[in-house]
Image (spheres, helix red, strand yellow):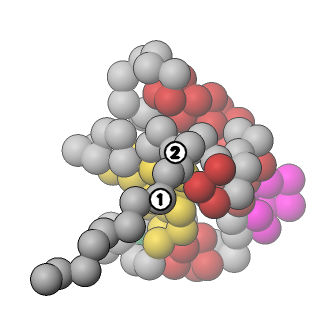
């Protein structure tokens, strides 16, 4: 008999995948000094709790295969058909607001442009 799957509850309403390798290449790339990684900035601005207690998962991944120049590749798991390229120094507050809208069922897919 196959082992039973264990189910673990989570508060996540979606997952955002942020390329950690892009962030590393930019040496952060965001925030006042341009040294903060995008995923950390998003979590902070959106006031997300840690792990599965967060209402939205923001996860740093390995290379997503897009490898944009001077930017970070990102996928909003709620709209995986359109990948996002977030340029270095982009307005993360605005990006977080758009992700927030998406979370509350507001506007269409997030557009990082
Ligand atoms: S390094 Fe980020 S997508 Fe490849």
Q: Main secondary structure of the magenta part?
A: loop
The part of the image, by quadrant, that contains residue 50 is bottom right
Q: Check disc 1 and report the residue beneath it.
A: 8
Instruction: Indicate the position of residue 43 as horizontal and vertical percent values.
Output: 69, 50
Residue drawn at 40 percent across, 77 percent down: 63
The answer to whether residue 92 is left or right of residue 12 is right
Residue drawn at 44 percent across, 20 percent down: 105
Instruction: Indicate the position of residue 72 as horizontal and vertical percent values.
Output: 51, 61
The answer to whether residue 92 is left or right of residue 73 is right
Q: Give 54 or 26, whichever is nearer the viewer.
A: 54
Q: Give 30 or 11, whichever is nearer the viewer.
A: 11
The part of the image, by quadrant, that contains residue 34 is bottom right
Q: Give 35 or 15, whichever is nearer the viewer.
A: 15
The part of the image, by quadrant, that contains residue 100 is top right
- Dot 1 and dot 2 residues touching (CB under 8 Å): no
Q: Residues within 10 Å of mark 1 (few under 14, many from 20)?
A: few
Mark 1 element type: loop
Residue 12 — which label? 2
In the rendered image, residue 18 lying in the magenta stretch gets the answer no
Q: Is mark 2 within 8 Å of ligand 1?
A: no
Q: Is residue 98 visible?
A: no
Give the Cα separation between the discs numbered 1 and 2: 12 Å
Instruction: Indicate the position of residue 111 as horizontal and vertical percent values.
Output: 42, 34
Mark 2 element type: loop
Q: Which residues are magenta?
A: 30-36
Q: Quadrant of ligand 1?
A: bottom left
Farthest residue to the right: give it.
33
Residue 108 vertical placement versus 96 (above, below): above
Residue 2 vertical placement versus 80 (above, below): below
Farthest residue to the front: give it.
1
């Amino acid at each position: 008999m196959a082992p039973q799957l264990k189910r673990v509850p989570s508060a996540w309403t979606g997952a955002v995948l942020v390329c950690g390798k892009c962030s590393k290449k930019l040496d952060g790339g965001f925030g006042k000094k341009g040294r903060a990684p995008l995923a950390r900035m998003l979590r902070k601005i959106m006031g997300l709790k840690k792990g599965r207690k967060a209402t939205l998962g923001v996860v740093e991944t390995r290379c997503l295969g897009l490898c944009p120049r001077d930017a970070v590749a990102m996928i909003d798991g709620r709209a995986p058909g359109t990948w996002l390229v977030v340029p270095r120094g982009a307005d993360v507050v605005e990006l977080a607001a758009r992700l927030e809208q998406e979370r509350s069922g507001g506007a269409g897919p997030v557009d990082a442009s």
